[in-house]
Image (tube, rainbow, N blue to C red):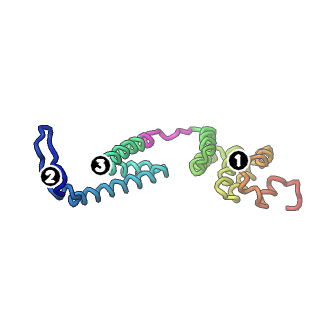
Amino acid sequence: MSNLPPSKNKRGEAIRISAGSRSGAAAAPGADSAEKQLANFENASKLFHARKFREAQGLFLLAAEGPERDVAHRASLHATMCGRRLEQAEVQCDTAEDCYNYAVALLNTRKTDEAQAYLRRALEMEPDSDHVHYGLALVGALAGDAAAAHDHLKRAIELDPKNRLMARQDVDFAAVAGHPHFQALLYPEKKSW
C-alpha cells in the first residue's frame, strides 16, 4: 500500500486517504447494499415481464435508490415504464360486440386469459351469440381444454351450422382436433365415432 501515490486535489495538494478505504474494508456495507439493489432490480424485471407492473414498480423504485448509478438509472427508467403501463386506461367495452372484438385482438396475441374474460362478459350480454361461443371454443382449444372447446363449439354450431366448416379449417383447434368427441362434432357424417 505504501507504493500508491497520494491523491491530489485541484490545487495539487496531497489528500490523505485512510488505508481502510483503499483496501476495500470499508466497502463491505456498500457491497451488501449493491447486492440488494441488484436483487431488487432482477426481481422487478421478472415481475415486469410477467406484466405485474404495480409490484415491479415498487421494486424498481427501491433499486433506484441503491448505490450503483447505472442500476439506479435503469431501475428509474423501468419504474417510469411501469407507471405508464399502469396509467393506461382499461378498455371500455359497452356492448357484447365490443367485448368480442377486443377479445379477438387479445387472442391474436395469444393472451388467452384476458380474451376469455372479455368473451365471458360478451356471453353474459348475449348468451346466444354463436361467434362468442366460437371464440370461447378457441380459447379452450388454445389452453388445451378439450371439454370447454367441445362444449362451446357445439353450441356455436347449434346456433349457426356454418361454424362447423370454419372449425374444420381453423388451425387453432389443432391441439384438440384429434379427440374423438371433437372429431364427432366436426365430422358427424362419419358414423364410426
Magenta region includes residue 91 = yes
* Helix, strand or loop for disc 1: helix
Residue 128 point in image, percent of width and height: 70, 46
Please give the residue where the numbered disc 1 appears in the rendered image.
134
Mark pair 2, 3: CA separation: 27 Å
User: Farthest residue in the front direction?
Assistant: 3
Quadrant in the picture for the C terminus:
bottom right
- Comparing 140 with 62, the one in front is 62
Q: Is residue 165 above or below residue 35?
A: above
Where residue 27 is drawn, which disc sits there?
Answer: none
The three-letter amino acid code for the residue at tag 2 is: Ile
Please give the residue where the numbered disc 3 appears in the rendered image.
65
The three-letter amino acid code for the residue at tag 1 is: Tyr
Residue 44 point in image, percent of width and height: 41, 52
Residue 124 in view here: no
Closer to us: mark 2 or mark 3? Answer: 2
Which region shows up in magenta?
84-93
Residue 190 point in image, percent of width and height: 88, 56
